[in-house]
Image (cartoon, grey):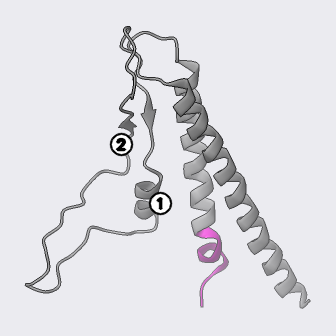
Amino acid sequence: MKGIGEYLNLHATALTVRAKRNKVLASNIANAATPNFKARDIDFQAMINKAEGAGPLRATDGRHFKVSMEASAEKMKYRTPVNPSRDGNTVEMNVEQMEFSENVIRYQTTLTFLNNKISGLKSAIKGE
């Protein structure tokens, strides 16, 4: 049987990663006018996989293809601009605002899922 921590862990981890990504995206927006600033982002799925203990793919049969997926989840990625600016800044406000808005909505959705799980646990404890 899973403990309460394991039951809530995925959503709690997702909230932490989403909060970190919000900070990175907000930093990008704040530095939109800084010359030579390079926009960065976090690979959310890679961070979640690392937190959940998902390791690299393994070939269990000789007929399997060898696949290497050793990308580090800890490193932030640089965003490739669609329209690079003359001053070397790679922040594109429309992209950053869209990513920030989407991340905030996903943060709120994850928070709702976590609250629903906690409410379910409270109901189970009370015997309702």
What residue sits 63% from the left and 73% below the top?
Answer: 5
- Whether residue 118 is situated above or below residue 47 in the rendered picture: below
Give the spatial CA distance, label 2 vs label 1.
Answer: 13 Å
Q: In the depicted view, which residue is nearer to us: 48 or 5?
A: 48
The residue tagged 2 is: 75
Q: Is residue 105 magenta?
A: no
Badge 2 vs badge 1, beta-carbon distance below 8 Å:
no
Q: How many marks?
A: 2
Task: Please state which amino acid type lies under the numbered disc 1.
Answer: Ile
Read off the residue under disc 1: 48
Along the polypeptide, which appears first: circle 2 or circle 1? 1
Vertical relation: 79 (above or below) 93: below
Kind of element beneath mark 1: helix
Q: Where's residue 104, x and y in %?
A: 67, 45
Q: Residues within 10 Å of mark 1 (few under 14, many from 20)?
A: some
- Whole-percent x and y of residue 60? 17, 84
The answer to which image quadrant residue 110 occupies is bottom right
Question: Of the residues shown, which amino acid type is indicated by label 2?
Answer: Lys
Residue range (magenta): 1-9
Judged left or right of residue 99, residue 72 is left
**Considering depth in this image, is 98 or 61 the residue closer to the camera?**
98
User: Would you place residue 61 above or below residue 87 in this image?
Assistant: below
Q: Report whether 125 appears left or right of 78.
A: right
Location of the N terminus (image quadrant): bottom right
* Element type at mark 2: loop
